[in-house]
Each structure stands twice: as structure tokens, then as C-alpha cells.
């Protein structure tokens, strides 16, 4: 049990990577607060089945108030917060030259501004608690490489990675570690439509040295490690979890 009796906040914990991360933390003994903006019934059931505490908070991470609600829920239900996983994100694929303003703005507001708001709110609580903590942003391989239909999205993933580098410096004095996880292509709702193209699926499966695209569960271990005392001297770092996709040029 690497996270016994820790309290973990996971934004976007209702589906996909966030749900898998929330369950992985609970499997390692954590109580979990998950944010969503629709429902998180399945995640709640998963975590209760593990005998751990779980609270779901409905809110849009692009609204700074949601971050306050998450901290408040962690304090009220579990006495504080030890780990933040800033995971909530969107990727509405769209071409660059005709990108609608609202698509660009919304992607920035959810993925980058939302990460900033929740990181700042949780870090302030962690500082007041005086026992350090671990903050993990779910960045992406897309922080390091581009995508024709992701010109609005890849800057946000690079941005959250950079946010962790700078907050690692700002928060080290409080014993708060900040790191990013960079998933490759993971089969979730975010890319369900994009990966309905068999040619794209074949391209990824050929390009990825491990021969398959990732599952949300493939991300949980990296997050639990960075959340735990196993990573006590790790901050300002990033961890690619991509099956070897990034390094495979030829
Ligand atoms: N899948 C992949 O290949 C990769 C994903 N990532 C990153 O992983 C993270 C999770 O993505 P993934 O699990 O694939 O996506 P999904 O679309 O499967 O899940 C997105 C999650 O984010 C929540 N969410 C979306 N918008 C908001 C919002 N405005 N406020 C609060 N919660 C919100 C959703 O909540 P709700 O259910 O209520 O809509 C849902 O829980 C993202 O940051 C993404 O950029 C990084 C690399 C690769
Ligand atoms: C949405 C993409 O398919 C997914 O998200 C990312 O960050 C990477 O670009 C993945 O391919």
C-alpha cells in the first residue's frame, strides 16, 4: 500500500484516465475526491467496492471556484489533501486555419487555466497543512510533439508540463513535489472518434514498440509512484508512459 490513508484529489475522475488513476490510488489505500461535470457514478462504485472513501464534486475546472470546492470537500470529508492529480482535459480535434475562436479558448481554459486554478488552490492548502504533498499534472506526449488537428491542444499539454516545472521550484520549500505524466495514445472517449479510422489505428499499432495503444489502467502505476514516498526526491520531472511511441522514429 503506497498511499495508505492519503487523500487524493483527481480532476476529471469520472471516465478514462482519471477514473483509472482514482481507482489505482484507492487500490493503494487512498481516499479520493473526484471532480466531474456530468456524473462519476462508476468511479464511486469502483472505489467503494475497494472499501475506500470517495466523494464526487460536480464542477467545471475552467471555473476557479471548482478548485475551492474540491479542496473544501477533501477537508470536510477526509481532513485535508495529500495528492492532487490534475487530469481533466479535452481535445476537440480541429484544423488550424479555420479553428473556431471558442474551440481554442475553451481548450485553453479547461486544460491549462483549469490546471493552474486547481494546482494553486491545493498548493495553498498543502502549505497551510505543513506536511508537504505531491502534485501531478497529466500532460502528454503531445507536450513534446505536434498534431495537425491539435494546434489548440498541444500547447496546453506543454503548458501543464511547464507549470509543474515552475511550481516544483515555487513549492519545494514547503515539501510539495510537482511532476507531470505524459501518456502516449490511450484508448478513451477523448479520441474515440479520431481512432475510428482503421488506418490511424494501424499506424499507431505499428509505430508503438510495445505493439498496442495504451489503456487508462496503464497510467495508474506512474501516478501512484509519483504520488508516493517512493518518489520522495522527484520533483520538476516528467514521465513518459507511451509504449515507446515518442522515441520510435525508425
Ligand atoms: N487519451 C489519451 O490518449 C491521452 C490523454 N491525455 C490527457 O489525459 C487527460 C484525461 O483524458 P482522457 O481520460 O483520455 O479523456 P476522457 O474524455 O476520457 O475524460 C475526460 C475527463 O475530464 C473531465 N472533464 C472534461 N472537461 C472538464 C471540465 N471542464 N471540468 C471538469 N472535468 C472535465 C471529464 O468529465 P465528464 O465525464 O464529466 O465529462 C472526464 O472525467 C486529459 O488531460 C488528456 O489531455 C494525455 C495524453 C494522451
Ligand atoms: C487526444 C489524443 O488522441 C491523445 O491525447 C494526447 O494527448 C495525445 O495526442 C493522444 O494521441
Image (spheres, helix red, strand yellow):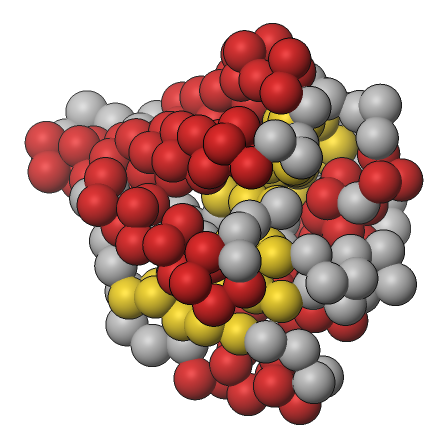
Residue at 40% in and 50% down: 71
Residue at 46% in and 56% down: 75
The answer to whether residue 54 is left or right of residue 40 is right
Total tally of numbered discs in the picture: 0
Q: Position of residue 170 (x, y in %)?
A: 54, 11
Residue at 69% in and 56% down: 6
Relative to 117, say whether 202 is above or below: below
Identify the image quadrant of the C terminus.
top right
Which picture quadrant has residue 120? top left
Q: Is residue 15 visible?
A: no
Relative to 203, say whether 96 is above or below: above
The answer to whether residue 6 is left or right of residue 80 is right
Q: Position of residue 142 (x, y in %)?
A: 54, 31
Relative to 218, say whether 154 is above or below: above
Residue sitting nearer the eye, 50 or 89: 50
Q: Position of residue 166 (x, y in %)?
A: 54, 12
Identify the image quadrant of the N terminus.
bottom right
Residue sitting nearer the eye, 137 or 124: 124
Q: Is residue 236 visible?
A: yes
Judged from this view, the residue extending furthest toward the left is 101
Residue at 66% in and 32% down: 132
Relative to 227, say whether 150 is above or below: above
Q: Position of residue 57 (x, y in %)?
A: 34, 66
Which picture quadrant has residue 225? top right
The answer to whether residue 190 is left or right of residue 130 is left
Amino acid at each position: 500500500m503506497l498511499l495508505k490513508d492519503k487523500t487524493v484529489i483527481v480532476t476529471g475522475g469520472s471516465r478514462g484516465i482519471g477514473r483509472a488513476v482514482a481507482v489505482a490510488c484507492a487500490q493503494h489505500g487512498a481516499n479520493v475526491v473526484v471532480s466531474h461535470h456530468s456524473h462519476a457514478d462508476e468511479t464511486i462504485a469502483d472505489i467503494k467496492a475497494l472499501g475506500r472513501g470517495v466523494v464526487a464534486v460536480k464542477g467545471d475546472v475552467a471555473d476557479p471556484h471548482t478548485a475551492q470546492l474540491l479542496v473544501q470537500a477533501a477537508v470536510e470529508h477526509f481532513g485535508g489533501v495529500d495528492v492532487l492529480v490534475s487530469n481533466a482535459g479535452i481535445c476537440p480535434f480541429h484544423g488550424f486555419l479555420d479553428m473556431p475562436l471558442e474551440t481554442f479558448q475553451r481548450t485553453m481554459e479547461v486544460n491549462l487555466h483549469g490546471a493552474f486554478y486547481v494546482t494553486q488552490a491545493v498548493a495553498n492548502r498543502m502549505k497551510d497543512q505543513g506536511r508537504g504533498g505531491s502534485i501531478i499534472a497529466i500532460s502528454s506526449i503531445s507536450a513534446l510533439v505536434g498534431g495537425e488537428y491539435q494546434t489548440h491542444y498541444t500547447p496546453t499539454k506543454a503548458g501543464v508540463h511547464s507549470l509543474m516545472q515552475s511550481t516544483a521550484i515555487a513549492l519545494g520549500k514547503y515539501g510539495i513535489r510537482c511532476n507531470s505524466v505524459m501518456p502516449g495514445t490511450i484508448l478513451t472517449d477523448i479520441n474515440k472518434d479520431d481512432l475510428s479510422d482503421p488506418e490511424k489505428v494501424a499506424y499507431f499499432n505499428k509505430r508503438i514498440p510495445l505493439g498496442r495503444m495504451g489503456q487508462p489502467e496503464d497510467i495508474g502505476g506512474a501516478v501512484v509512484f509519483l504520488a508516493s514516498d517512493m518518489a520522495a526526491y522527484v520533483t520538476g520531472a516528467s514521465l513518459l508512459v507511451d509504449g515507446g511511441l515518442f522515441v520510435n522514429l525508425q
